[in-house]
Image (cartoon, grey):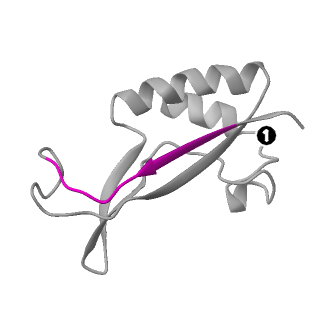
């Protein structure tokens, strides 16, 4: 199947405007998948806008360590496994993500 893959990498750092300014946080690699069709292309445009507005990721504390994590916008991080594993098939995904965006 034809697909689009989005990969974002965040380096460990800290910046003003973070939940705990001046405190370091751990970065990470994040990968999400969209089908290369009309719905996928429309969603990619909306996700890009959300990313530019700082809405796709957040910083959370895990075991006393601040880390970059996915935000509240749902992403498909696998091609398979269905909704339970953040993958496809998921008949409601495009409706849900567009509602959030």
Seen in the picture, residue 14 relative to 3 is either above or below; the reply is below
Seen in the picture, residue 45 relative to 82 is either above or below; the reply is above
Crowding at mark 1 (Cα within 10 Å: few <14, some 14-19, many 20+): few
Seen in the picture, residue 72 relative to 40 is either above or below; the reply is below
Magenta range is 5-15
Task: Residue at 10% x, 54% y: name it.
Answer: 21
Please tell me in which quadrant of the rendered image residue 19 appears.
Answer: bottom left
Task: Residue at 24% x, 78% y: name it.
Answer: 64
Seen in the picture, residue 45 relative to 83 is either above or below; the reply is above
Residue 71, given in percent of the width and then of the height, sits at: 42, 48
Position of the N terminus, as image quadrant, is: top right
Identify which residue, 76 or 12, lies in the foreground: 12
Q: Is residue 9 left or right of residue 66?
A: right
Residue 59, given in percent of the width and then of the height, sits at: 30, 56
Please tell me in which quadrant of the rendered image residue 22 appears.
Answer: bottom left
Task: Residue at 79% x, 23% y: name it.
Answer: 37
Residue 54, given in percent of the width and then of the height, sits at: 33, 36
Quick one: SS at disc 1? loop
**Magenta run includes residue 7:** yes
Most extreme residue toward the bottom is 63
User: What residue does disc 1 label?
Assistant: 91
Most extreme residue toward the right is 1
Task: Residue at 42% x, 33% y: name it.
Answer: 51
**Magenta run includes residue 85:** no
């Amino acid at each position: 199947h034809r697909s689009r893959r989005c990969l974002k990498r965040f380096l460990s750092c800290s910046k003003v405007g973070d939940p705990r300014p001046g405190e370091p946080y751990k970065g990470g690699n994040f990968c999400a998948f969209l089908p290369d069709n009309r719905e996928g292309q429309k969603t990619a445009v909306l996700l890009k806008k959300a990313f530019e507005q700082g809405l796709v990721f957040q910083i959370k504390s895990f075991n006393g360590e601040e880390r970059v994590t996915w935000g509240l916008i749902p992403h498909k991080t696998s091609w398979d496994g269905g909704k339970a594993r953040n993958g496809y098939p998921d008949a409601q995904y495009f409706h849900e993500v567009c509602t959030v965006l």
